[in-house]
């Protein structure tokens, strides 16, 4: 059984900084050649941003480590990567990463993920049953994804949708709207308010796209 991490203090801002360093090193190794969908921005920018949001909203160091690695198993090797995380960073971090993954297919070896709608519905269902520690990381992940999507749309316009598996913006409204509904009342109020704001902007983008068809 893993020990409970102490709280943060002015004298001790990190509970286990060595864990954070190891998580970052592994994350950088696994994602170093990956880019965000719409622009040539290194993917680690997203991982840093999610980890920062988790810190800002009170997450502990294991949650921060999981935030840095939340896409590692899903995108960079499936079960084998999850087992490596457990070996190098502990079962708690690996357990969080597992619950944050919508697929554990090893795409690096040519294995196909399940259909997009099946994976996303399973993820939504899982969030409905998840504990507060998983919810915080997931909400921070979705907040940064939505912020990035809105930023990319300002720069690229409606062509941004073509970079996603699903190019219909209404599908993204369904997915993020379902998750925000599952988060309500279960995450820090400030984080919930930010999610509601960016979701409203996404809904408006989708409505504009429909009117222009």
Image: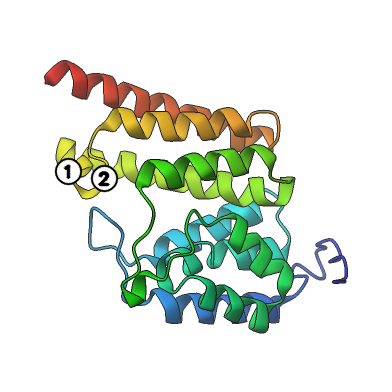
Question: Nearest the camera: 115 or 23?
Answer: 115
Mark 2–mark 1 Cα distance, whole angstroms, equals 6 Å
The x, y position of residue 11, in whole percent, is 82, 70
Residue 117: quadrant of the picture: top left
Residue 11 in view here: yes
| In the image, farthest residue toward the top | 211
51 left or right of 42 in image: right
28 versus 47 height, above or below: below
Which residue is at 52% across, 81% downward? 25
73 versus 139 height, above or below: below
Residue 198 in view here: no
Decide: marks 2, 1 in contact (CB < 8 A)?
A: yes
Which residue is at 73% across, 67% downward? 92
95 left or right of 138 in image: right
Q: Quadrant of the N terminus?
A: bottom right
Question: Nearest the camera: 176 or 205?
Answer: 176
Q: Which residue is mark 2?
A: 152
Q: Quadrant of the C terminus?
A: top left
Residue 171: quadrant of the picture: top left
The x, y position of residue 172, in whole percent, is 36, 35
Q: Residues within 10 Å of mark 1 (few under 14, many from 20)?
A: few
The x, y position of residue 116, in whole percent, is 36, 46
117 left or right of 81 in image: left
Question: Nearest the camera: 34 or 45?
Answer: 34
The image's colouring method is rainbow
| In the image, farthest residue toward the left | 213
Question: Nearest the camera: 117 or 208?
Answer: 117
What secondary structure is found at the residue carrying circle 1?
helix
Q: Residues within 10 Å of mark 2 (few under 14, many from 20)?
A: some
What secondary structure is found at the residue carrying circle 2?
helix
Q: Which residue is mark 1?
A: 156
55 versus 31 height, above or below: above
């Amino acid at each position: 059984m893993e020990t409970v991490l102490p709280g943060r203090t002015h004298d001790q801002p990190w509970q286990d900084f060595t864990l954070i360093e190891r998580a970052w090193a592994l994350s950088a190794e696994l994602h170093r050649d990956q880019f965000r969908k719409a622009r040539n921005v290194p993917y680690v920018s997203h991982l840093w941003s999610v980890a920062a949001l988790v810190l800002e909203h009170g997450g502990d160091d294991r949650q921060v480590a999981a935030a840095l690695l939340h896409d590692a198993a899903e995108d960079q090797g499936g079960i084998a990567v999850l087992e490596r995380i457990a070996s190098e960073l502990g079962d708690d971090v690996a357990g969080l990463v597992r619950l944050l993954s919508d697929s554990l297919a090893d795409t690096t070896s040519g294995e196909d993920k399940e259909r997009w709608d099946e994976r996303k519905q399973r993820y939504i269902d899982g969030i409905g049953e998840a504990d507060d520690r998983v919810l915080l990381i997931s909400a921070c992940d979705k907040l940064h994804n939505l912020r990035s999507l809105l930023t990319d749309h300002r720069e690229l316009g409606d062509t941004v949708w073509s970079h996603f598996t699903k190019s219909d913006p209404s599908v993204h409204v369904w997915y993020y709207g379902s998750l925000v509904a599952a988060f309500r009342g279960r995450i820090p109020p400030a984080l919930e308010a930010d999610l509601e704001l960016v979701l409203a902007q996404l809904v408006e983008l989708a409505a504009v796209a429909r009117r222009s068809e």
